[in-house]
Amino acid sequence: MSSPVRCLAWGIGSQQTLIKTASTVEGIDVVLAGSPTSDESREFAKAADAEQVDDLRAALLRDDWDVAWLIAPGCLDGDIRRVIRGLDKPVATSTPPADTVQIIASEDPAASNTHFLPLMRLGRPYRGAEQILESFGPVTSAHVEMIAGMDGVTSASLLYDAMDLVNGLFGMPDNLFAARAGEGMPPADATTPLNGHIVVSLRYPNCAAAAVSIAEGGGQWSRRIALLGEGGRLIVSDDGVEWLSADGEILDAGRGQTTDIPTAGEVAAHHLKRLAQQSEPQDEIDKTIATLCLCEAVRLSCITGQVEDPGRIAKMLQRV
């Protein structure tokens, strides 16, 4: 029997459930855990039944872990990214980089050793649905719904996941419009993660369109995308796949066959294991900058109340 994957986890107090559920997955062992503050660090490590670490930089330089999982909002700053680039072990993050897209784009993508997870596009249900998409025909619209639940998943994390998903489906939109619900103004500082409930409308060439809904809270973490097109309706979630033809015929009914719907921590743990074992799917072309351009356009639209063009941001970075 192979040894479990040793994980270093860095989160905040409200993310204890994530680390607890990840620890229950066979083959993953959270051995080091900590938080930005000492009080939270103690509780976070206790929740994971792991050794407490109080300095992320020092913890990353240790040799007694196989994969690191950074989930605390704002922890992926310039200093930590520099440390990660010098490591020979994989680092997973569930929070976007704490910097502007211009700074991220100026860094050498080939030297990056971070992998965002869990991405729905690289999850097993969606990858299984890709076979259906090969015969589905053109997709004319997509409706994405992602709900944070009560496990400490953030709106910024779900937004990155959703923008990666629609970018993989349609590419860069002509424009988008976003609105944020929640108390206070959206953060004007690009290094502060966007929070609250977020709704995004995206318009693409050839009259294609997508709608994205991100919700904080909501009781239970969930991700779902409904695709409409010539092939009918295809629904993909972490619960499986459901395909109805344009005539209403059930072509695939694999969705909803179990009540054992995975939690965010469980899904992340399976990605962490595959990442440590070098079996996690990888894109031939890095999509990080395109995804961050979409997220930045969403942030700007929430602030200005205007339509934004993420393609313009990408062109400014010469990363179209």
Image (cartoon, rainbow, N blue to C red):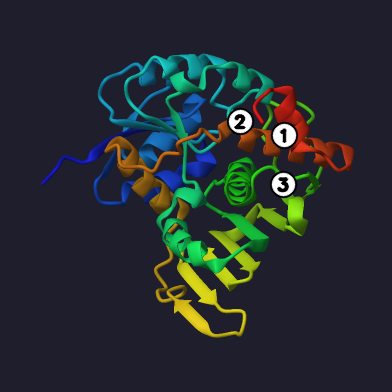
The residue carrying mark 1 is: 296
Q: Is residue 174 above or below residue 88?
A: below
The picture places residue 140, in percent across and down from the top left corner, at 69, 62
For marks 2 and 1, give the CA distance.
10 Å
The residue carrying mark 2 is: 289
- Residue type indicated by callout 1: Glu
Q: Is residue 182 visible?
A: yes
Q: Which mark is residue 221?
A: none
Q: Nearer the viewer, mark 2 or mark 1?
A: 2
Residue at the image point whose x is 49% and y is 32% from the top: 40
Q: Nearer the viewer, residue 35 or 254?
A: 254
The residue carrying mark 3 is: 196
For marks 1 and 3, give the CA distance.
15 Å
The mark that comes first in sequence, 3 or 2, is: 3
The picture places residue 317, in percent across and down from the top left corner, at 69, 22
Residue at the image point whose x is 64% and y is 68% from the top: 228
- Residue type indicated by callout 3: Gly
Query: Is disc 1 surrounded by few (<14), some (14 to 19) or many (20+) residues within 10 Å?
Result: many
Residue at the image point whose x is 75% and y is 29% from the top: 313
Callouts 2 and 1 close, C-beta under 8 Å: no
- Residue type indicated by callout 2: Ile
Q: Is residue 237 visible?
A: no
**Farthest left residue in view:** 1
Callouts 3 and 2 close, C-beta under 8 Å: no
Q: Nearer the viewer, residue 183 or 26?
A: 26
The picture places residue 143, in percent across and down from the top left corner, at 67, 61
